[in-house]
Amino acid sequence: MLNESLRLPTIGNTMRYVKYHALGNDYIVIRAADLGDGFEPRRIERICHRNYGIGSDGVLLGPLPSSTCDFRLRIFNPDGSEAEKSGNGLRIFARFLRDEGLAGQQPFTVETLGGPVTCQVDPDGKGVTVEMGQVSFDSAKIPVVGSRREVLRERIEVGDRVFEYCAATVGNPHCVVFGDRPTPEDARHYGPLIENDARFPNRTNVQFIEVLDRQNIRIEIWERGAGYTLASGSSSTAAAAVAKRLGLCDSEIVVHMPGGSLQIRLSADFSATMRGPVVRICSGTMDREMFEG
């Protein structure tokens, strides 16, 4: 959580934004040049609120200067917390950079709290490929409490259920839960219990997975700091990596979600490449009055 204040531009009473969605997972992009001195969690909550704000699954702030990459991005959840990485957010940010004329057709790099990634936007701008980095199942890196190990096929008891799960990190933490034909109700009910389980000191994103065949999986998602969501790029990457690590799937996997499908390709060392669409919704200005009261 951050203690900085969100200040609207000193000229006028509005702040510009652009809104996109990636398979129904929507983000608001704000250019750093259009922002004052930073963010305060309660104001991020207001921006993301579906009734009192614009409404979104998060806020993307960038581009920011980077000493290691072409651009730097900060990603904020609807509860005001800052996320390390977001696959859908990165695809949206890449499309935004292309739309703004800041990036072209050649690959470019983006710095996130969860590590650097490489992005490339299709010539028509509507599809984006992101090299997400290496997936790890190491408990110390995720993190998961207990002795250092690969967190595979362990058991977790939440509420009235006992699940088998695996954990992974794609630069942010994930818990992949196995069950029969997962439903949105499963994600909404058990997701927050698992997200806040004591074994995950940084909380965790949760995916309820069904393996369809060696090239296809289906997931329902509870996102840390955001709640139930229609799609997630990092969740898709983590779930696909778990399926491959357990020998249930091959290296190229289509991940099916309520919002649509993503293509994940995994190398021998579990470096992941994600590909999927992005849609521009609208652009506009936020009025200062939205933050009053």
Image (cartoon, grey):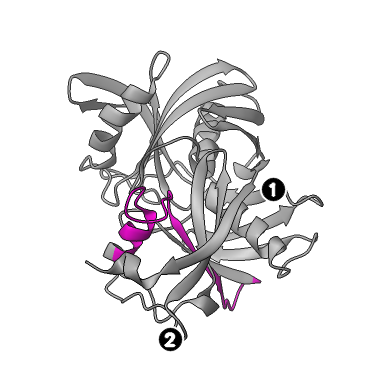
The front one of 14 and 37 is 14
Is residue 222 on the magenta stretch?
no
Q: At 52% across and 23% down in the image, what residue appears?
A: 218
Residue 115 percent location from the top left of the image: 52, 61
Tag 1 near tag 2, CB within 8 Å: no
Mark earlier in primary sequence (1, 2):
2
The front one of 14 and 256 is 14
**Residue 81 visible to the viewer:** no
Q: At 31% across and 57% down in the image, what residue appears?
A: 45
Amino acid of disc 1: Thr
Q: Which residue is mark 2?
A: 10
Is residue 128 rendered to the left or right of residue 145?
A: right
Residue 26 percent location from the top left of the image: 50, 47
Q: At 21% across and 26% down in the image, what residue appears?
A: 157
Is residue 68 on the magenta stretch?
yes
* CA distance separating discs 1 and 2: 37 Å
Q: At 56% across and 46% down in the image, what residue appears?
A: 21
Find the residue positioned furthest to the bottom. Answer: 10
Residue 169 percent location from the top left of the image: 45, 46
Residue 256 percent location from the top left of the image: 56, 26
What number is the disc on residue 129? Answer: 1
Local secondary structure at mark 1? strand
Amino acid of disc 2: Thr
Find the residue positioned furthest to the top. Answer: 180
Is residue 239 rendered to the left or right of residue 117?
A: left
Q: Which residues are magenta?
A: 43-70
**Residue 211 visible to the viewer:** yes
